[in-house]
Image (spheres, rainbow, N blue to C red):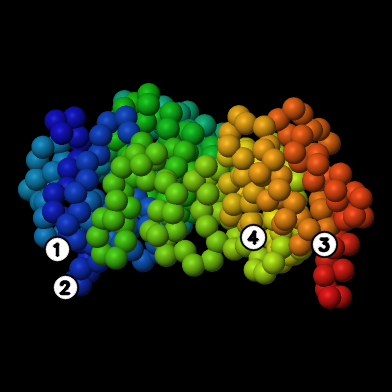
Amino acid sequence: MDKSIMIANALSVGYGRKTVVEDICLMAVPGQILTLIGPNGSGKSTILKTLIRQLPPLSGTVFLEGRSMPRMSHLEIARSVSAVLTGRPEPELMTCEDVVRSGRYPYTGRLGILSEADQQKVDEAMTAVGITDLRDRDFNRISDGQRQRVMLARAICQEPKLLILDEPTSFLDIRNKLDFLYLLKALVRERQLAVILSLHELDLAQKFSDTLLCIRDGGIDRWGTPSEIFTDGYIEQLYGVKHGRYDVRFGSVEAEPPHGAPLVFVIGGGGSGIPVYRKLQRMDIPFAAGVLPENDLDLPVASALATEVIRERAFEPVSAEAVQRAMEVLTECRYLVCCTEIFGTMNRGNRQLLTFAEKQNMILPVGELARLWDKTSAL
């Protein structure tokens, strides 16, 4: 508790008399990233705007470095907290350096004249985020990824102890998302910044956060580390997912499986079956998969997309019982797709399935999956 830069107790936030989220308790700790996740409209941005006093709290208290924020001046807060909110700022006739320099205004006095020491802070911030080559560029004529770096430089130029960001990766492509978050993580570690941010990208929230705050139905639904939050079934519950699922092992969204009796049996393993599972799902063709060990890389995706998965215990050879069950399912299918050419000692049972399918003329090569679409369309 003593290490926390910001603490919110029993905080309620909203607009006018309308409460959006109530009874919020959170802590911002140096060297850690606290991430807010939850459905659209759940109140993540409202919380962040309240923490920086852009909105007044409806009830509760926010403490900044042990002091009640309502008793602090805007200048005092600006010297401890910096924010990058959603939206695309479009300052008129400002270079990127001008934008970064504006982060020093809490220290420059009424005239806003930067000293040599202030300019050094500007240079250090631009170097830290890798935008010195943008110094003289018009801020309105650079890419979204470059803009986010400029705004981050402006924020750290302010020398905050706490950085608050609202959906900082929303306008960025995958490369710039990763670059931005790796840069942020490095700044957190090197400068011992405390960070509170909101993210829609759950895979990134899972990988870059130290702590997560889950918001739903006007309150805090759950709080914890990524391993405590990203558990089987919880993300679907948090977001009210009705079609598909979120795979916490891969940090990826899987679509809803095809419905109906399986038409295809897929022998995979070691990740070899995953492209086939997803292609069959896109073609809306129900399939079965097996025999897969419980620790196999294929299993999470197969479990999400297949009508049935025949499993075997981890580190055990495919048993006669598993082969028998797989054979029962296979005989009800029309085709078998084999994604592997290697059948080791532990996997001999799957070789039996392939041999049976070869005798029954059921084999469909992986490269001919497109033919399956034509055949099923004619049924």
The answer to whether residue 350 of the structure is visible from this angle is yes
Drawn side of residue 344 relative to residue 174, left or right = right
> To which residue does mark 4 refer?
307
> To which residue does mark 3 refer?
334
Instruction: Say what amino acid the circle numbered 3 marks.
Output: Arg
| Residue 55 position in % (x across, y down) | 22, 60
Instruction: Tell me: residue 66, above or below residue 70.
Output: above
Separation of disc 2 and disc 3 at Cα? 62 Å
The answer to whether residue 276 of the structure is visible from this angle is no
Dot 2, how many residues are within 10 Å of its Cα: few (below 14), some (14-19), or many (20+)? few
Name the N-terminal-most of marks 3 and 1: 1
Separation of disc 1 and disc 4 at Cα? 50 Å
Give the residue displayed 81% in from the left and 33% down from the top. Answer: 342
Drawn side of residue 69 relative to residue 51, left or right = left
| Residue 315 position in % (x across, y down) | 60, 29
> To which residue does mark 1 refer?
58
